[in-house]
Image (cartoon, rainbow, N blue to C red):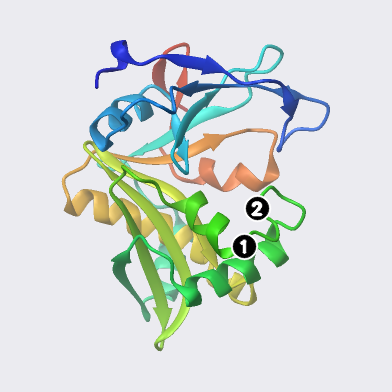
Amino acid sequence: MSIEELKFFLSTEQACSYLSDIQSTSVFADPDAKMTTETYSLLINHGFRRSANYVYRPHCTSCTSCKPARIPVKLFKPNRNQKRVWKRNSNITISATPAEFNESHFQLYQKYIAQRHTGGEMDHADRTRYIEFLNSDWCDTVFYELKLDEQLVAVAVTDNLTEGLSALYTFFDPDLAAKSLGTLSILWQIEKAKEMNKPWVYLGYWIEACEKMSYKKNFSPLEIWEDESWHAI
């Protein structure tokens, strides 16, 4: 299905998850339409993002802070800290697993949420809600396991798209914060995109005023979708 054939719908207002005193709305692609990886690849190149089976883009009347962000992998150059993170984690092994429920993944996810994102939308998610959040019925998704001496320490949920990889979600052992496993997972996905000859790694939305998203600007050059086109910042 082409973008021109899709219908789009505006959500009702709700409190923004990232900025206080802001009401947010989103534009959703028709959830009843036949979505494919190819169609989603076109949509993500226009600032959209998926959550479960839903494909959306922020469309707030009073705020334009949410900026779709991506890394042009051929231009990316790691900074000194990122080089140290890569070297420090040379003993981490990374392997692909199917995008399906795995109890060890779920237990790590619960630990991560409890310490890093308590009170959020996915706090206290059960097994069904957890896998529905990360997976979809139509997207080519891979769960990459990061292990240290056979111990699972992180999972990077990645959508394989026609012209890039989308870093959908990463969760890791919060007891190993010093290893910067979130940064490592993005660095690895950049290398994976290069290996697959894909030009972009999509990072979802970046909000300059949101501290939890500040790490995204460390991946330079970063491109954002604004005024219906991509711009380097």
Q: Give the left or right position of residue 57, taking residue 97 as reference.
A: right
Element type where label 1 sits in the image: loop
Q: Which residue is mark 1?
A: 126
176, 39: nearer the viewer: 39
Give how far across and how far down residue 199 sits, in percent. Answer: 24, 38
Element type where label 2 sits in the image: loop
**Identity of the residue drawn at 52% across and 16% down:** 9
Q: Give the left or right position of residue 224, taking residue 98 as reference.
A: right
> Which quadrant of the view contains residue 19?
top right
Give how far across and how far down residue 84 sits, in percent. Answer: 45, 67
Three-letter amino acid code at the position of disc 1: Asp
**Identity of the residue drawn at 77% across and 25% down:** 22
| Residue 222 visible to an observer of this rendering | no
Q: Which residue is mark 2?
A: 122
| Residue 112 visible to an observer of this rendering | yes
Q: How many marks?
A: 2
Three-letter amino acid code at the position of disc 2: Met
Please identify the residue farthest to the bottom as the structure is shown. 149
Give how far across and how far down residue 210 sits, in percent. Answer: 69, 39
